[in-house]
Structure formats: C-alpha cells, structure tokens
Image (cartoon, helix red, strand yellow):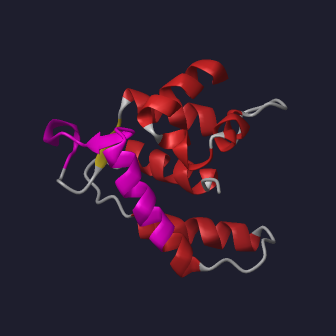
Amino acid sequence: MKYNWDLIERLLQHAQDSANERFNPRKYAVQLAEEEQSAGASHINEDDLKAQACDYEALLLKADFIAPRPEAEGGNGENFVLTDRGLQLLNMIDSSFPGEQHPREILDREGLSALVPEVFDKLAVKAT
C-alpha cells in the first residue's frame, strides 16, 4: 500500500498558505477529485478521498510535518505551518519535479512507513 502523494502535496500546500484561514482537508480533497475527474480520471470516490485527507492531516500533525500556526503568523487554532520536515516532504513530492527517479518512488518503496519520522528522515537524505 502507498500514499496518495497528490493529496498530501495539496494538503501541505494549503497548510503553508493557510494564514488566517481554517485548514479544511475535506474541501481540498473534493477540489483534487474534481480536477482529476475533469482531466479524465475514472470515477473517484469523494467520500473515501475526504476521509483519507482527514487521516493524512492527523498523520502529518503527529509526525511533525505540520504544526499549529502561531497567532503572530495568522494562526486561529484551526490552521498550520509546515515544519522543516514538512517543507522537505513538500519539496520531495512536488509533482513538477523532473527526472526519472522521482522521490515519490523512493518513498513508495517504504510503503506506509515512509512517513514515520525516523524512516522519512533517512529517505530524505537519500532523495536529495
């Protein structure tokens, strides 16, 4: 099993840009589903994608990829900032990354353990 990197990328981007706004992973999942469907993807189960987005939010917070946004930076108790680890992950999974050996492939080889902080930190060194 592997992660939905497009969804995680979108969540990290919105966390990065969420000053003074509520972070809404379900909304971002619907936006992604709509974009994928308009690009010709087969039926996408939005409910599953919304649930996955909420699960990813919890995982990213727990594994220190995102952290609560300080009030001085537009924090409202319902939004986040990227940590150094989160910024590194966003850079690794950037969908515009060129080349054959995309860092997403390196992460996929680890399966669901790829976002365990200790595992990710070692993979990030290899990928850069």
Rendered view: 14 above or below 88: below
Q: Name the residue at 62% across, 80% down.
A: 45
Quadrant placement of the C terminus: top right
Q: Is residue 128 in view? A: no
How far across and down, in percent of the image, does residue 2 sit?
Answer: 64, 53
Residue in the foreground of this view, choosing between 94 and 110:
110
Rendered view: 54 above or below 120: below
Q: Name the residue at 57% across, 32% down.
A: 91
How far across and down, in percent of the image, does residue 100 sit?
Answer: 84, 32
Rendered view: 71 above or below 29: above
Residue lying farthest right?
100
Q: Quadrant of residue 70?
A: top left
Q: Which residues are magenta?
A: 51-75
Quadrant placement of the N terminus: bottom right
How far across and down, in percent of the image, does residue 119 sit?
Answer: 51, 32
Rendered view: 19 above or below 73: below
**Magenta stretch containing residue 53, yes or no?**
yes
**Magenta stretch containing residue 103, yes or no?**
no
How far across and down, in percent of the image, does residue 117 sit?
Answer: 42, 34
Please tell me whether the stretch drawn in magenta is mainly helix, strand or loop.
helix
